Amino acid sequence: MGDIGLLMIRLVVGLLLAGHGTQKLFGWFGGAGPAETGRQFAAMGYRSGRAMAVLAGLSELGAGCALAVGVATPLATAAVVGVMVNAAVAAHGKNGLWADNGGYEYALVIGVVAVGIATHGPGDFSVDALVGMTKTGWAWGLGVAVLGAASATIVLLSRQSEETNSDPTRSHDEPRAE
């Protein structure tokens, strides 16, 4: 029964995350697409907003699909943690915890679910189990949390400071008009 529960969690979280990726990449499901999402990333201080939008979209789409089917689960969950830490800090951190105030609640829940899946493993109904590559245990969960947080930190450090990001409507992909 536990493996069916893990399958349900992986499918829902993975497919919703993949859907978020398609919103950024293609504008599907009411998303803004790469140009507008790029402007949003630029407003958060990223030097190349459009490139970050594409990177975030690809990360969400790839990690979401991999998580849903349970393939390369440690890498997929680390990518999920990285994306969620980045979202929590860059997009939602200033709004506090609760999602109804624009806070990081959703990103926190998805990140913790990813670490939980990494700790427990993907379950019997997964590609990893089918090919005998299931990895489980607290060390895997800790490793995923550390790898995800480290990758998010690298991305977050690429942002410009608030002082240099004085025009949030301008994409940093375009030169500043002097």
Image (cartoon, helix red, strand yellow):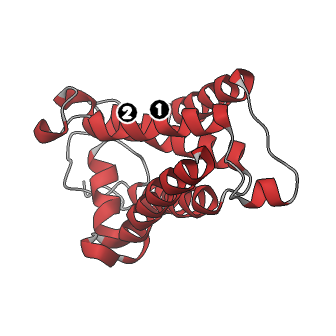
Residue 157 can be seen in this image: yes
Q: Nearer the viewer, residue 14 or 103?
A: 14
- Residue 150, above or below 66: above
Q: Which mark is residue 127?
A: none
Residue plotted at (75% across, 61% down): 127
Give the residue pinned by disc 1.
Answer: 112
Residue 13 image point, x, y percent:
45, 53
Give the labeled residue for mark 2.
Answer: 108
Depth check, front residue: 148 or 36: 148
Asked if residue 130 is positioned above or below residue 107 in the image, the reply reads below
72 left or right of 46 in image: right
Task: Specify the amino acid type for callout 1.
Answer: Val
Look at the image and tell me whether residue 160 can be seen. no
Residue at position x 30%, y 75% in the image: 29
In depth, the one of 11 and 173 nearer the eye is: 11
Residue 10, position as x, y percentages in the image: 54, 53
Q: Residues within 10 Å of mark 1 (few under 14, many from 20)?
A: some
Looking at the rendered structure, the secondary structure element under dot 2 is helix
> Picture quarter containing residue 85?
top left
Q: CA distance from mark 2 to mark 1?
A: 6 Å
**Along the horizontal axis of the image, is 136 left or right of 163?**
right
Label 2 close to label 1 by CB (< 8 Å): yes
Say which element carries label 1. Answer: helix
